[in-house]
Image (cartoon, grey):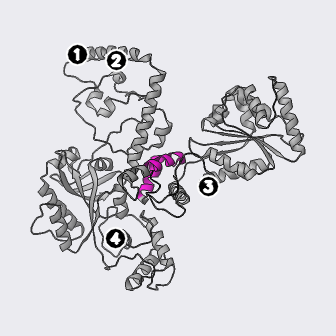
Amino acid sequence: MYTAFYGLREKPFALSPDPKFLFLAQSHREALAHLLYGIEQGEGFIAITGEVGTGKTTLCRTLLQRLGAESEVAFVFNPKLSGLELLKTINADFGLMHQSDSQRDLNDALNRFLVEKKRDGKRVLLIIDEAQNLERETLEQVRLLSNLETETQKLIQIVLLGQPELDALLETPELRQLEQRVSVRWRLAPLSAVETRDYVRHRLRVAAGSARELFTVPALRELHRLSGGIPRVVNVLCDRALLAGYAAGAREVTPALLRRAAAEVRSLARAGRSRRARRARPALLDVSLAASLVAGVGLWLWLSRAPGALPPTLTGPVAEALPAVEAAPPVEAAPTVEIAPPVEGAPTVEAPAPIAAEPIAEALVVAEPPAPTQIASYPPPRDATLPALGTLLSETPAPDSATASLSALLSAWGLTPEERPPRDLDAVLAALARRRLAVLPLPAGDLATLRALNHPALLRIKAADGASRLVVLRALDAWEATLQGVGPTGAVRVSAAELEALWGGEAWIPWRDFESLPDIVQPGTAGRSLVWLQETLTTLGFYAGPPTGRFDAQTRSAVQAFQRSRDLIDDGTVGPRTKMSLYDAVPRYEVPRLQPGREVG
């Protein structure tokens, strides 16, 4: 559906395995090396574990390609078998068709086959996928297979692939003999942030036939956070995000599109769990309904004994008083909270959480949905009690917010206030232009982009009264944001999550083009501005050539390396965002910063 829109020949993130999309991260390469080493050394048992979706099956397919024709391999995909059924499956996979149900006959046939293959100089492997599902007695049968050996060598080598539960299973006392025979063991790790980026770019390049930068750098960082670096989850989120981008007519996938995709995937996963729960437990409905009625009566009687008094949990946040229905842990302060009905009018109301408040990786794997997260707001100095940000904004008239925001921006740049206060956004932008400040508009920005650009920004935020106000983002780290032009104190700190929940993405970032640089896009561009660019990139450690004053391939590569270090799209062009970041990186330019101590690289 979206392939033609994005210039792709096929879907890049299909879940079905396709050898041409193979991408081996560092953990996969090391695991493959351990596998090949163990097989070459004739080790009896090899165990590879990893979380769901980390690429165990992909690793196994790669191993089979490396082994070649000198190996005979039996691959068991469904290990939920008895010992006898497993033995029959193994023999059938090796082409040994016997009708006998005698375990002895099956073992004898397998032993003759193994001896024959050893005489022919062939290696015999048994690979069991999803081995954590093996019953203990079946694992004991697997151990007995390893007893098939000559005086000097094992006749069969066994590779166990499974989830981390396999490690726990092998460590049980009943299986200590098997655990002692596992001579090579490796656990697959999720992709790192850099590997996630390279994985996405690799699949896009294969699907398009050439490089395609369809995900912004902040989006790739958000993708890693949401997916936890699990390749299967990366595929699901990327596919959904591209579909959402196609529907929205967006040529690039932004963090906002990824969060939308994550929310959709979470809702589908939860709906699936709900359907399964309804099918599995229809008879429990009447029981739970009766229990709820009894619990409600009990709670009413308890409350009626102390008029006006509420239990401790009901005076706390709603997120604590009303936990998620499925598997939410009870709150210690009020053991009856599990059966309490929803209470209207609880004194404290939780601030709305943004879509991306939780990674999606667990939502696809774990049975319980995550519990709601309370979003804290941070008070200004003097320990004053701060209302919710939306309420605080509604107490400031829109013209006053424009005036306060302009004053905050001018102060950040070391400029004097305007004599005539602005009344709206257009007046603020006009005043900035009069002070020779350029403005980079962001119609659909996000906090990750603002962190990357590292300049104070003018934001339009929705207040509690439904209207919008202008505020200045003056500082931003991973958890908190400092806003100016808000409330009676003029500055307030809030959680980054609360800000993101109320901010629609509109921003205007003032910046100064100190060197009056033209936008540099085409190779071959020449001039004094190129000399400055090359010298600056040399100072920052990205360019090692002479200052030729020409935009050549070496200079473009240096620009791309700098862009990657600043979480920008590494397209090699020098536009407003790259120029802003260059000035930000050079100490001699007096640039106000959201994160003053940030270093390049």
Labels 4 and 2: the sequence-earlier one: 2
Which quadrant of the figure has residue 404?
bottom left
Instruction: Please determine whether, in this image, residue 462 is positioned above or below residue 558.
Output: above
Question: Where residue 343 appears, x then y in whole percent?
Answer: 26, 26
Gap between marks 1 and 4, in whole Å? 66 Å
Main SS type for the magenta part? helix
Q: Are marks 4 and 3 in contact (CB under 8 Å)?
A: no
Q: Which residues are magenta?
A: 218-240
Q: Amino acid at mark 3?
A: Lys
- Comes first in the chain, label 1 or label 4: 1
User: As drawn, is 331 to the left or to the right of 303?
Assistant: right
Helix, strand or loop at disc 3? Answer: helix
SS at circle 1:
helix
**Mark 1, residue position:** 304
Task: Name which quarter of the figure residue 520 lies in.
Answer: bottom left
Q: Secondary structure at mark 4?
A: helix
Q: Is residue 368 visible?
A: no
Residue type highlighted by circle 4: Pro
Nearest-to-viewer mark from 2 and 3: 3
**N-terminal-most mark, 1 or 2:** 2
Q: Residue at x 14, y 52 (%)?
A: 488
Q: Which three-letter amino acid code belongs to the residue tagged 1?
A: Ser
Q: Is residue 85 magenta?
A: no
Residues at marks 4 and 2 touching, judged by CB atoms closer than 8 Å: no
Q: Which residue is mark 3?
A: 20
